[in-house]
Image (cartoon, grey):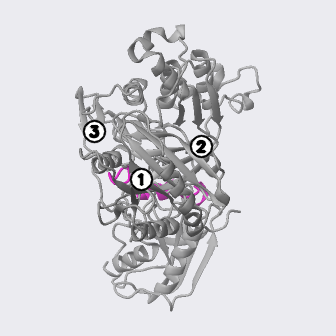
Amino acid sequence: MAPITVTPWRLVLPEAMKAELFAHLFPGDNDEHGAIILAGVCQTDRGLKLVARELHLAIDGKDYVPGRHGYRMLKGEFIQSRILRARDLKLAYLAIHNHGGTTSVGFSSDDFASHERGYPSLVDISRGLPVGALVFARSAVAGDLWFEDKQRAPLKEAIVLGQRRELLYPSPLKTTQVRRLEFDRQSRLFGDAGQELLRSLRIGIIGLGGAGSILAELLGRLGIGEFVLADPDRAEVANLPRLIAARRMDAIIDWLPRGLRTRFARYKVEMAARNIRRANPSARIVALQANFLEPDVAKQLVDCDYLFLAADTMGARLLFNAIVHQHGVPGVQVGAKVPVSPSGEVGDVFCVARKVTPGHGCLWCNGLINPSRLQDEAVSDEARRGYAYVADPQVAAPSVITLNAIACSHAADDFLFQVTGLKNQDAQQDWFRWNSRKGTAGYDGPRRDLECLECSSVDDSRLGRGDFFPLPTRAK
Amino acid sequence: MTSITPIVEKAIAQIRASFPDCPLESVPDGGGGAFVTLNSVPLGHPWAQTDTWIGFQITFQYPYADVYPHFVRPDLKRADGQPFGPGLGQAQFQNQSAVQVSRKSNKLNPAIDTAALKLLKVLQWLRSQ
């Protein structure tokens, strides 16, 4: 295991886990209670991120008892089984208790003394994985994480993923809000703080074709600060009508000799980056002219704050779904389907926006990743040529910009209201579906398999496992 | 060339253990998966031949991807002289003529639906034709 870099860290906590934890910590008795969270470790260019995977509640009087040095403590047996589990699953260990107060919280001197007594040996037991503590108030959290050689780092923020993206800090942030004239009209909805929040986000868009191009335009114009774009394809004449602000010379360079005219067509990620910069010149953009399934590309997308999947291959769905659950990155899959039979008969034309977060909407559970098509995509063209008949995933399906626009607008709007905290707590969570021929909008309720290896917390599952679990990328 | 991933290697080892009397050959497919050929696999009723080789590709997307199609000896014939039914057709596997056996599994549990289990199901289906 490579040494873990010591940095201030973030914690990602699913909303359902926070609700269960808070019901335990704050039952209304104004007393102190305890628990343990085991969390996946993600080392990123923005510092260390821990993704909460398991919550172990300590029973008062049995697991959480009067302390020898402080007020209360977790009992040795309770700690021992969890630290060994953390070591075996390669997870960070976080001991939890609560204090009074609301928007500010910190460890007491007794708390720090107990960390100094106990955590160096717990780091030894965990074989170098981080070990630490969290202390919660009703709207605040502080953290103290220990690494090898008695190094330690404080919690920067906790991100609660749910209907609304909630941020918790040790004490209220002192921010300087800059009014930006170009965003005046929209910031009248969510304030300068909301606009600053959008500027602070890193968004990943996978696939910059007909749908991804629209997403880039919408998100660029919202003032998102940072983008990671991934698509290996260049523009072609046949897709220019569906790419925002595309020009003929993006696909064909007329002054080149005939055989070279399309060879130097512009990459779709370059076209999307051009549009984003036109909308927001200060946006930082990483434009990856490569397939999402390449390990180096996937690695650049695992620390986004939100992912938009606009590439309709089964491999991309599998990897997107895996990143959401393994690295705690919420996302949405957008797509449209225009079924046309060989005889030209048009079936139900529809588009969808399927929100996927840890705890809601796994694409695998819902049968939206077809194992046979995954195999077809992974077999090389050369091998497939010998097969008797296998559906060719490269065959171009009908595609229409209006359908893409409906799905993408819905997805981007849902994202906007979620991250700015304006979404109602009881808002619709099911998957949006628009049927163009029937003129109907509807919602599909996603199912949940309690033993799913992607989204459940069964022992072998991917959920919250961070860097120490393989992603379904191509082999290096 | 990318070598075979550990998870595909494990799948091959499971097949070897499940068919101890059938010599197994595997070659990397270049993307982390492998082309696998199992030899001297008993065929039984209703086929004219007593045994066959059976080949297939386990791709880097295993265990999420279905292991399909499978390929068997090109001269496969029914004992009763009748033509093949649905799911069987002439094809090529690894540049050699073969009969393709197309049995998709659209619902798959990666925890239990191993390449070895899929192979057993395909052989059972062949024997039930």
Nearer to us: label 2 or label 1: 1
Is A124 in front, or is A277? Answer: A124
Q: Position of residue A93 (x, y in %)?
A: 49, 59
* Placement of the N terminus of chain A among the 4 image quadrants: bottom right
| Label 2: element kind | loop
Q: Residue at x 59, y 62 (%)?
A: A120
Kindly identify the amino acid type of the residue bearing the numbered disc 2. Answer: Pro
Whichever of callouts 2 and 1 sits on the residue coming sooner in the sequence is: 2
Vertical arrangement, residue A255 with respect to residue A394, above or below: above
Image location (x, y in percent) of residue A363? 38, 49
Q: Is residue B127 above or below residue B101?
A: below
| Viewer can see residue A386 | no
In the figure, residue A450 lies in which quadrant?
Answer: bottom left
Residue A8: numbered disc? 2
Q: Quadrant of residue A262?
A: top right
* Residue type pointed to by label 1: Ile
Q: Chain of mark 1?
A: A
Q: Nearer the viewer, residue A226 or A206?
A: A226
Residue B58 at x, y = what percent?
A: 53, 67
Looking at the rendered structure, which numbered label has been put on residue B118?
A: none
Q: Amino acid at mark 3?
A: Asp
Query: Where is residue A133 drawn, in percent x and y?
Result: 48, 52
User: From mark 1 to mark 3, how far is it between C-alphas?
Assistant: 33 Å
Q: Which residue is mark 1?
A: A96
Q: Could you tell whether A258 is left or right of A200 in the image?
A: right
Q: Which residues are magenta?
A: A363-383
Label 3, label 2: how many angstroms apart (C-alpha)? 35 Å
Kindly report the distance in space between the C-alpha atoms of the residues bearing marks 2 and 1. Answer: 18 Å
Q: Secondary structure at mark 3?
A: loop
Tell whether label 2 touches label 3 (CB within 8 Å).
no
